[in-house]
Image (spheres, rainbow, N blue to C red):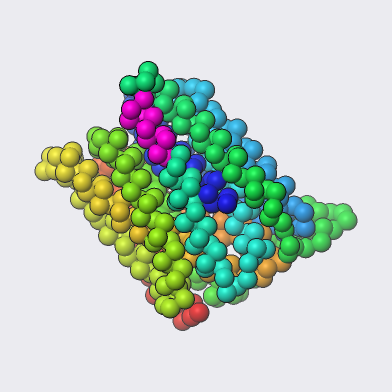
Amino acid sequence: MYDWANSVYATIVMTAIIPIFFSSVAKAAGQEGDYWWGLGSSIAMATVAILAPIVGSFSDFKGYKKKLFSIFLILGLAFTLLFALTTNWIALLIGYIVSHIGFSGSCLVYDSFLTDVTTHDKMDRVSSYGYALGYIGGSTIPFLASIALVSFGEKFGIDSILAVKISAVITVLWWGIFSIPFIKNVHQIHGKEKPENAVVSQAFRSIFVTAKDIIQNKRVFVFILAYFFYIDGVGTVIKMSTSYGTTLGLDSTGMILALLVTQIVAVPCSILFSSLSKKYGSIKLIILAVCIYLLICIVGFIMGLGVEQNFLTNSEALRLFWILAILVGTVQGGIQAISRSYFGRLIPVEKSGEYFGFFDIFGKFASVLGPALYAFTKNLTGSSAFSILSIILLFLIALIILGVGRKHLVE
């Protein structure tokens, strides 16, 4: 149910409504919206990446997981509300950075609960159904309401700015209310006994022990290294898609509707990944998904270059954007769900918090690299098309690692 709850943030704030709104506000202030959005994403991810192993270590003490989860949840909810209170681009950027930290921190602790709620043989199914619920719930129902507000609100006296503010309130209410079942019913089962004293020093000491264990376990190390690069590419595509399209001048409503198609396609595809993993194995499916993301970046580059060089009209580019949205939907949920469950099967259950802390730190530091690479390439070339092309590098490195280390990843 927390996948159902938190996906509203991922869709409305990270991907669709707020990025478009921020880009337009920043542009009105004479700023490059996609540049600042990419930089803001990097700052948020860097912060969470630094905190991840520390949070993971503390969460492994019995009774700590739920407390840490709640702190990040409240932080995320409070600063998401800021989008409903201001139209200043700097304040919006600050709200995005801090709320993103709250969202990501809560997801870090939430993922580590996977070992508490199911067994190894059911992890793919539980993780995939979680993502599917997310796409059905938070990514679709409030998303439709936000689309209706943005597209048709003026007929009822609701201008575009007020529509965005109402969408922010919907996000906070949906995320908060549907987090209650998780807070009430899910409990930490595995964990370490909290020492009577020196809790902080014990937590930090444990971080170094776990880091050493990860490096020495070739199966875990090879996978988490490949994950670092491909999840970076996945996250960058999610975060920068609408900001990229807005910079190219694509129709906002058309892009938002295309992203709705992504959510709809992702529901059955996430569940399909769970079924296929039993037959073909998680690693083969991850490699397939990475290859599809390579194709997505290439098509995205062609679309952007076509607009910049005037051999594609905006309507033609928007059609390509729709094709990209469908392609993303086939693999976005599946690659994240299978990665989460595959890692969950590799780790000791009593140290799930610490291990998922490192899993998260690799993911978050990766999420710093991708948007920063996008922003750097945009600054260097002045072209958004070449910025999206640069993301291919991340997927190629991941494929090389998965190929070279394949013998260690046999399931």
Residue at the (46%, 26%) spot, across then down: 165
Residue at the (53%, 49%) spot, across then down: 4
Residue 271 seen by the camera: yes
Near-viewer residue (206 or 118): 118
Near-viewer residue (260 or 31): 260
Near-viewer residue (280 or 126): 126
Instruction: Considering the whole magenta stretch, tell me its main secondary structure.
Output: helix
Above or below 167: residue 186: below
Near-viewer residue (220 or 130): 130
Residue at the (60%, 39%) spot, across then down: 176
Q: Quadrant of residue 163?
A: top left
Label tally: 0
Q: In the drawing, does residue 135 fall left or right of residue 118?
A: left
Q: In the drawing, does residue 133 fall left or right of residue 317?
A: right
Q: What are the residue bounds of the magenta stretch?
A: 143-153
Looking at the image, which residue sits at the far right?
196
Q: Quadrant of residue 111?
A: bottom right
- Residue 137 appears at what percent x and percent y? 48, 47
- Residue 65 appears at what percent x and percent y? 71, 53
Residue at the (81%, 61%) spot, across then down: 193
Q: In the drawing, does residue 383 fall left or right of residue 372?
A: left
- Residue 46 appears at what percent x and percent y? 53, 46
Q: Quadrant of residue 275?
A: bottom left
Would you say residue 244 sits in the magenta stretch?
no
Above or below 153: residue 408: below
Looking at the image, which residue sits at the far top?
157
Q: In the drawing, does residue 23 fall left or right of residue 365?
A: left
